[in-house]
Image: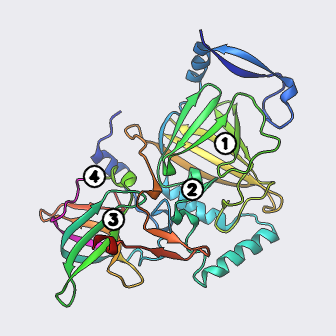
């Protein structure tokens, strides 16, 4: 019984609540559930590691200055079963991002989606 | 021919309790017959993913737990500290495994593997192993205090009944409540259908609960999944201080 990724996506549509988002910590430091966009970002680093992946990008902030952002993401254990891999993102890639911001105001948060120039979107929390 | 040592339990095996060792004799069973016996057990083998919606319901059930006055006061004090910014984060943020019963309820899969006299449960999160001894041995009379406790199991028809004692005081039975030396757990593990495994977990402890407290989690079979490595210390940028205040190192300094 071989189940394809597409069948899995239809059969097992999952949305993570705040209590189950991570194997190892609470989501209290993020504005969980309130995704904001960051457009025209450039990937600088993609860490395919446990307990979390990390995505580093640069993008222009509201004042037009180029700044760095860091986004925590789900683990490779979760993401590898949801269509992601260590090859998903490469430095230099142009992407749009949505994320739950850090409450402390630093340039970062929890990554929710990544959208590529061809319109393809990958989701961290639903698959 | 290799033989496998098995305990031959001369007394009824429905209740495995300490002190029955005198009624047991060690016999030898051929490797062939030991593995043939496994083929007759319910098909637990495989990779099972916890149902996350069941885990959410679990939090609600824990809110209704039949707590003693002492346990209620402990949890109330724990929750009151949250208002001061404490107890937001657990030691899990520092990569410490959670222990029972949380070890069975991580958002990542578990795998059941049978071997003669043992049901092995491999837990993907933190790459852990629980061994349920089904060879008829008794629970240890003077157990060490372990995160996942000390477990023996027996079969009641197609239900694996697992008794566990001896829990580390570092673990939590639910948020803010640590076990005592009297804490016992009994899990009833069974297949509701070939693709759905259910575990009912009952915790008893006269200091903490006024009556046995049972919660249920189900799992779906994932025939195409393999367990992956999970080393939390690989790149952990989250942390909890000793009062459970969270912090996060974004790692910008390391990029410079």
Same chain, marks 2 and 3?
no
Dot 2 and dot 3 residues touching (CB under 8 Å): no
Closer mark to the observer between disc 3 and disc 4: 3
Q: The disc numbered 2 marks a residue on which chain? A: B
The image's mark for residue B188 is 1
- Provide the residue span drawn in magenta: A83-98
Taking the magenta stretch, the answer to whether it contains residue A87 is yes
The residue that label 4 is drawn on is A85
Residue B88: in magenta span: no
Report crowding for label 1: few under 14, some 14 to 19, many 20 or more residues within 10 A (C-alpha): many
Q: In this view, does B169 lie above or below B185?
A: below
Task: For the C terminus of chain B, give its image quadrant.
Answer: bottom left
Q: In this view, does A110 lie above or below B31?
A: below
Which element is circle 1 on? strand
Q: Which mark is residue B97?
A: 2
Q: How far apart are marks 3 and 4 (CA)?
A: 13 Å
State which quadrant residue A116 falls in. bottom left
Looking at the image, the residue that sits furthest to the top is: B1
Mark 3 lies on residue: A54
Look at 32% across and 74% down and name the residue there.
Answer: B252
Q: Observer-nearest residue: B172 or A123?
A: B172
Question: Which of the two labelled residues, at mark 3 and mark 4, occupies the earlier sequence position?
Answer: 3
Quadrant of the image occupied by residue B178: bottom right
On screen, residue B1 above or below A90: above
User: At numbered mark 4, what does the secondary structure look like: helix, strand or loop?
Assistant: loop
Mark pair 1, 2: CA separation? 23 Å
**Callout 4 touching callout 2 (CB < 8 Å):** no
């Amino acid at each position: 019984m071989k189940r394809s990724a597409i069948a899995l996506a239809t059969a097992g549509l999952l949305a993570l609540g705040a209590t189950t988002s991570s194997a190892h910590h609470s989501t209290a430091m993020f504005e969980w559930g309130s995704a904001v966009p960051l457009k025209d970002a450039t990937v600088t680093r993609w860490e395919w590691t446990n307990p979390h992946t990390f995505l580093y990008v640069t993008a222009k902030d509201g004042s037009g200055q180029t700044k760095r952002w860091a986004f925590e993401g789900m683990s490779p254990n979760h993401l590898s079963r949801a269509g992601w891999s260590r090859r998903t993102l490469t430095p230099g890639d142009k992407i749009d991002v949505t994320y739950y911001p850090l409450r402390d105001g630093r340039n970062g948060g929890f990554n929710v989606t990544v959208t590529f120039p061809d319109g393809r979107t990958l989701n961290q929390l639903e698959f | 021919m290799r033989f496998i040592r098995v305990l031959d339990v001369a007394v009824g095996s429905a209740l495995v309790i300490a002190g029955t060792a005198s009624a047991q004799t060690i016999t030898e069973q051929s490797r062939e017959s030991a593995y043939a016996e496994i083929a007759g057990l319910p098909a637990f083998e495989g990779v099972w993913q916890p149902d996350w919606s069941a885990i959410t319901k679990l939090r609600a059930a824990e809110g209704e737990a039949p707590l003693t006055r002492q346990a209620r006061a402990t949890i109330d004090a724990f929750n009151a500290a949250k208002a001061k910014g404490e107890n937001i984060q657990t030691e899990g943020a520092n990569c410490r495994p959670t222990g029972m019963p949380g070890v069975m309820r991580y958002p990542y899969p578990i795998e059941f593997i049978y071997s003669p006299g043992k049901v092995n449960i491999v837990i993907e999160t933190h790459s852990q192993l629980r061994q349920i001894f089904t060879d008829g041995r008794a629970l240890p009379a003077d157990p060490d205090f372990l995160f996942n406790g000390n477990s023996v199991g027996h079969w009641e028809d197609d239900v694996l009944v697992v008794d566990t004692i001896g829990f580390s005081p570092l673990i939590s039975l639910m948020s803010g409540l640590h076990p005592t030396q009297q804490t016992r757990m009994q899990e009833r593990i069974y297949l509701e259908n070939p693709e759905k495994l259910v575990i009912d977990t009952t915790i008893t402890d006269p200091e903490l609960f006024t009556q046995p407290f049972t919660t249920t989690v189900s799992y779906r079979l994932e025939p195409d999944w393999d367990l992956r490595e999970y080393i939390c210390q690989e790149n952990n940028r989250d942390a909890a201080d000793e009062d459970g205040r969270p912090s996060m190192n974004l790692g910008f300094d390391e990029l410079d």
